[in-house]
Image (spheres, rainbow, N blue to C red):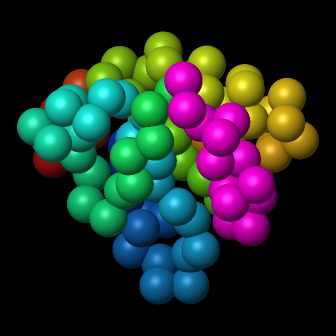
């Protein structure tokens, strides 16, 4: 798993050829309060249930509020053989600061 900064993620999102998927691993309540546009909500504890679906994406960016839960979710996915994951450094906290 690699780390990605909010600035790097914004550049990837600007690239129309990018085939990345954004996954918010926070609770549905947190996701409803604020989230990165076009992200899917899959709580960290449910991430392995979706592993077979996530394998099809060439790049997966995981985020949470501060980066801890998304790092855990990324490690779980790596254990399932999904290595094309990125952890958004600082999560939503840093994303909101960068806007």
53 shown above or below 26: below
Q: Which residue shows up at 60% across the image and 36% down it?
A: 47
Magenta residues (range)? 45-57
The single residue placed furthest to the right in the displayed view is 81
Magenta highlight on residue 51: yes
* Depth check, front residue: 48 or 6: 48
The single residue placed furthest to the top in the displayed view is 68
The single residue placed furthest to the bottom in the displayed view is 16
Magenta highlight on residue 55: yes
Mark yes or no: residue 35 visible: yes
The single residue placed furthest to the front in the displayed view is 49
* Residue 64, horizontal then vertical, whole percent: 38, 29
Mark yes or no: residue 90 visible: no
* Residue 83, horizontal then vertical, whole percent: 81, 44
1 shown above or below 52: above
Q: Magenta-highlighted stretch: main secondary structure?
A: helix
* Depth check, front residue: 92 or 3: 92
Q: How many marks?
A: 0
Q: Report whether 85 appears left or right of 24.
A: right
55 shown above or below 48: below
- For residue 48, what is the image quadrant? top right
| Quarter that holds the N terminus | top right
Q: Which residue shows up at 44% across the image and 32% down it?
A: 43
79 shown above or below 34: above
Q: Which residue shows up at 41% across the image and 67% down it?
A: 13
* Depth check, front residue: 44 or 93: 44
Q: Report whether 44 appears left or right of 64.
A: right
């Amino acid at each position: 798993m690699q780390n990605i900064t909010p600035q790097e993620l914004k550049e990837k999102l600007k690239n129309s050829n990018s085939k990345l998927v954004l996954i918010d691993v926070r609770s549905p309540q947190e996701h409803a309060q604020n989230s990165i546009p076009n992200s899917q909500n899959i709580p960290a504890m449910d991430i392995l249930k979706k592993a077979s679906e996530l394998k099809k994406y060439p790049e997966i960016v995981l985020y949470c509020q501060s980066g801890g839960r998304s790092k855990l979710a990324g490690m779980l996915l790596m254990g399932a053989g999904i290595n094309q994951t990125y952890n958004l450094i600082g999560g939503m906290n840093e994303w909101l600061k960068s806007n």
